[in-house]
Image (cartoon, rainbow, N blue to C red):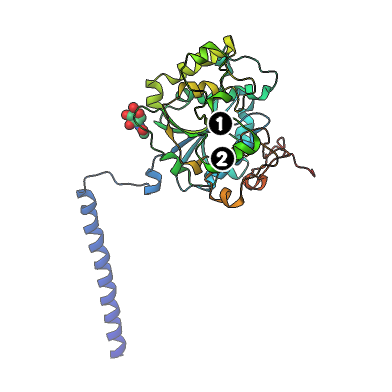
Amino acid sequence: MAVLRKINQILLFLLVFTICVILYNKVHKMPSTLLKNEPVDLESPEEMEEDIPVVICAAVGRMGAAFAAVSSIYSNSGSNILFYIVGLKNSILHIRKWIENSKLKDIKFKIVEFNPMVLKGKIRPDAARPELLQPLNFVRFYLPLLIHEHEKVIYLDDDVIVQGDIQELYDTKLAPGHAAAFSDDCDLPSTHEMVRSVGMQNTYMGFLDYRKQTIRDLGISPSTCSFNPGVFVANMTEWKHQRITKQLEKWMQKNAEENLYSSTLAGGVATSPMLIVFHGKYSPITPLWHIRHLGWSPDARYSEQFLHEAKLLHWNGRYKPWDYPSIHTDLWEKWFVPDPSGTFKLIRPNS
Ligand SMILES: *[C@@H]1O[C@H](CO)[C@@H](O)[C@H](O)[C@H]1NC(C)=O
């Protein structure tokens, strides 16, 4: 019995001691928190980080492109991304359903409606390639109207796949006085090979009609390397300061009146005004962040090794990876998010 009483005493002592320790901790933690005199962070550090705004258009008929891009960006980044998905009025509902009823439901997004009325009288009909007149091609001209809460913004064409962390692209340095950063069309040796093999233009001559006096008056050498406006990082403050939107509209309007842009236009009617307005006034994007021309030819291919290292792939050109024929389609299709409504379908040889 004596032994049991002893054990009981020890247990009681331990219990009391433990309670004292707990009380001590409670009492001494409280004041220290209060003394810090700063707001208590309830959110984890990740949630406190700034969102990276990414603008991407979802056009009727090729909506699967935008969501493959979104899925690749979201999956390959550890950062918080806010997607601005831009569409025309009649596709807003489809966009929302695609996101909410697929694996994209966890992304942070805003759906923005673009009203093509702003383009009235500024674009001329292009009978040869009507798809390039898609009003959404001009959304990039109006970024400050869509984005209000962010100074720095990423714009991406829908026919891209991102294989790196988008934070790296977002960290692109813009030199003072530059409203945007683009990839120069002479930036990579592999691009040169591609350019030669499919005979494509990579200078201003390919986009502007140098027979027109208005173009010659610009004083831009026709052999100047062009840049691709399908991937860019922009500073909205500088953009507004330089009234870039107004300038782009002016060059759209002038083209509608005088037909200034090359008729065999490579990158669509939205490219030429960008080339004029940003001439000599843009910062570079790291070459691996914009490997392009994947849609230029159904058979000219890049090496697998090279594509593996690429951070961003761009199928600019006619041969789109959701269509057939196209090249390096596997690299695109692994990010494809099927349309929950079943409307959008991939075009494949055996389907
Ligand atoms: C954007 O441009 C403004 C005005 O030139 C400048 O003050 C600001 O630092 C720039 N911001 C970034 C993120 O480059």
Q: Quadrant of residue 148?
A: top left
Q: Is mark 2 on a helix, strand or loop?
A: helix
Residue 194 appears left or right of 79? right
Residue at the right extreme of this rendering: 350
Can residue 105 be spotted in the picture? no
Q: What residue type is labelled 1?
A: Asn
Residue 348: image location, x then y, percent: 75, 42
Q: Do the residues labelled 1 and 2 touch (CB within 8 Å)?
A: yes
Q: Can residue 164 be seen in this view?
A: yes
Look at 68% across and 22% down and name the residue there: 130
| Label of residue 290 in the image | none
Element under disc 1 = loop
Total tally of numbered discs in the picture = 2
Residue type at mark 2?
Answer: Thr
User: Quick one: which residue is furthest to the top in this view?
Assistant: 257
Q: In which quarter of the image is residue 314?
A: top right
Q: With respect to residue 302, does 238 lie above or below?
A: above
Where residue 55 appears, as percent x and y from the top left, is 51, 32
Ligand 1, image quadrant it occupies: top left
Q: Which quadrant, please, contains the C terminus?
A: top right
Instruction: Give the labeled residue for mark 2.
Output: 191
Disc 1: which residue? 202
Indicate left or right for 238 with 216 as reference.
left
| Residue 323 horizontal/vertical position (percent) | 71, 37
Q: Nearer the viewer, residue 11 or 296?
A: 296
- Which quadrant of the figure has residue 283? top left
- Name the spot of residue 260 as percent of width and height, x first: 57, 15
**Foreground of the two, 5 or 350:** 350
Location of residue 281 with respect to 51 vertically, above or below? above
| Mark 1 burial class by Cα count in 10 Å: few <14, some 14-19, many 20+ | many
Foreground residue, 329 or 202?
A: 202
**Of marks 1 and 2, which one's residue comes earlier in the chain?**
2
